[in-house]
């Protein structure tokens, strides 16, 4: 019986509640200990205006690169456990404030379009708060069906105010 192949996975991280930079640090630490996965890299932090109609504080965002043997659904399940462990409230408004948001952006070249999981993550082309940090760590990565991260970052259509923070 063969073991699953290692594939790259990219996770978008955001927080705008309860010390957002610390929430992201804790999230990154948890990702580095995830089963059948190896932490590879992370972007710098970005401050961005909130996306969506709910008034709320600015977000701190980053992107992390892993290699993993996990299937996307299992990876998503573990990401949601990390969010829950950091107080994520799933009953709040869509695009509302969060202690921690972990979005599975892409998992290798896999295309998934199910009720509970879509890969690549929908709306990537419109989110500079995902594309700019992602371009720092994997500009040549080919987002399935969309093209390179670097090209997508240059062409992002929705540009909330964003600023790269010093580390």
Image (cartoon, rainbow, N blue to C red):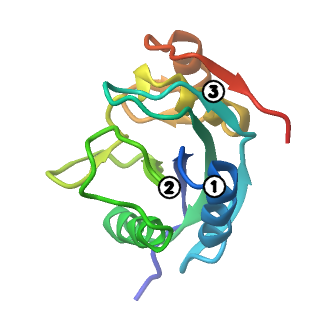
**Compared with residue 28, is residue 135 higher up or lower down, i.e. above or below?**
above
Residue sitting at 41 percent across and 27 percent down? 51
Q: Distance between the residues labelled 2 and 1?
A: 7 Å
- Give coordinates of residue 123: x percent, y percent: 35, 28
Residue 132 circle label: 3
Decide which of tag 2 and tag 1 comes sooner along the chain: 1
- Give coordinates of residue 7: x percent, y percent: 53, 59
Q: Are marks 2 and 1 in contact (CB under 8 Å)?
A: yes
Report the front residue among 161 and 77: 161
Label 3 packing within 10 angstroms: few (<14), some (14-19), many (20+): many
- Give coordinates of residue 86: x percent, y percent: 50, 68
Report the front residue among 148 and 49: 49
Residue bearing the label numbered 2? 100
In the drawing, does residue 53 fall left or right of residue 104? Answer: left
In the drawing, does residue 135 fall left or right of residue 77? Answer: right
**Compared with residue 61, is residue 157 higher up or lower down, i.e. above or below?**
above
Residue sitting at 54 percent across and 67 percent down? 68
Residue bearing the label numbered 1? 24
Q: What element carries label 2?
A: loop
């Amino acid at each position: 019986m063969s073991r699953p192949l290692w594939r790259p996975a990219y996770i978008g991280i955001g927080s705008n509640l309860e010390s957002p930079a610390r929430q992201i640090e804790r999230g990154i630490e948890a990702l580095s200990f995830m089963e059948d996965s190896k932490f590879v890299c992370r972007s710098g932090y970005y401050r961005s205006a909130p996306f969506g109609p709910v008034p709320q504080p600015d977000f701190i965002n980053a992107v992390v690169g892993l290699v993993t043997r996990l299937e996307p659904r299992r990876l998503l399940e573990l990401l949601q456990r990390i969010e829950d462990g950091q107080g994520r409230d799933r009953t709040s408004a869509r695009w509302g404030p969060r202690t921690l948001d972990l979005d599975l952006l892409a998992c290798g070249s896999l295309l998934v379009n199910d009720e509970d999981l879509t890969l690549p993550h929908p709306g990537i082309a419109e989110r500079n708060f995902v594309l700019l940090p992602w371009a720092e760590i994997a500009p040549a990565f080919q987002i399935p069906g969309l093209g390179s991260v670097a090209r997508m970052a240059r062409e992002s259509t929705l540009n909330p105010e964003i600023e790269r923070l010093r580390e």
